[in-house]
Image (spheres, rainbow, N blue to C red):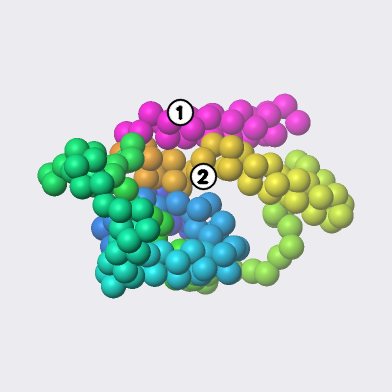
Amino acid sequence: MSAYWPWWAGAIGLAAVTIFFTAATGRTLGLSAAWDRVLHWREERELERLDAAFTDDEFAEALAHATAAEFGTPQAHTAAATPPDSPAPTTAGGPFRGPAPLVTHAALLGSVFVGGLIAAVVSGRFALRFDMGDAFRALVTENPITMLVVLFVGGVMVGFGTRLAGGCSSGHGLSGCGGLRPVSLVATAVFFGTAVAVSFLLWKVI
């Protein structure tokens, strides 16, 4: 069985994926957001269709004419409210942009699965199993039903925490910390601090 790949190779790989995704899409990387959008793909498709309709030039011109015909055109008020050189709407992260296309997030999730599969096969560690390994059985439980319950509850708690924090370790730890966002720095410190504390509890106390 092959040894694990060096840690620096994983760091370079994660950095390359994050930079490539941001350069290709103009948006930050986040797996929890991608997973949420793919799970709700029907709603996301409808939102993309509506967004495409409202960004169509002919539709926008027709809407403007209909609005002017119905309510008039307060030119003076409009000119005062929106000067010709006014900048585009912005958010805390820069110019306002909608989410990446749904297919982009689907491809991202698929790439995570395929990449993990390739890494497992190449390293000689690929094996189908339904538990977390020998260490998990020794520290937590050997009962398969209890193990499934523990994993399910843990997954729900991770999902709740991700939603509460507004992102996961990829969104905050890779993209957010890379952009020196204060909320991401705090969130990532909480993520990894809790992981260290729980690992210490499992290995040293229990």
Is residue 94 shown left or right of residue 154? left
Mark 2 crowd level (few <14, some 14–19, many ≥20, 10 Å Cα): many
Is residue 93 shown left or right of residue 106? left
Q: Position of residue 104 (x, y in %)?
A: 41, 67
Secondary structure beneath disc 1? helix
**Mark number, residue 186:** 1
Residue 127 sits in quarter? bottom right
Residue 139 covered by magenta stretch: no
> In terms of secondary structure, what is the magenta stretch mainly?
helix
Magenta stretch? 180-206
Q: Say which residue appears at 21% left-offset and 47% top-offset.
A: 75
* Residue 86 seen in the figure: no
**Mark number, residue 130:** none
**Split into 4 quadrants, where in the image is the C terminus?**
top right
Q: Which residue is mark 2?
A: 168
Secondary structure beneath disc 2? loop
Q: Position of residue 118 (x, y in %)?
A: 48, 71
What's under tag 1, amino acid-wise?
Val
Rounded to the nearest whole Å, what is the CA distance between mark 1 and mark 2? 12 Å
What's under tag 2, amino acid-wise?
Cys
47 and 20: which is toward the camera = 47
13 and 64: which is toward the camera = 64
Q: Position of residue 149 (x, y in %)?
A: 81, 50
Task: Say above or below: 165 vs 29.
Answer: above
Residue 188 covered by magenta stretch: yes
Q: Say which residue appears at 86% left-offset and 55% top-offset.
A: 145
Count the marks.
Answer: 2
**Split into 4 quadrants, where in the image is the N terminus?**
bottom right
* Residue 26 seen in the figure: yes
- Label located before the other in sequence (1 or 2): 2
Q: Say which residue appears at 19% left-offset and 38% top-offset.
A: 80
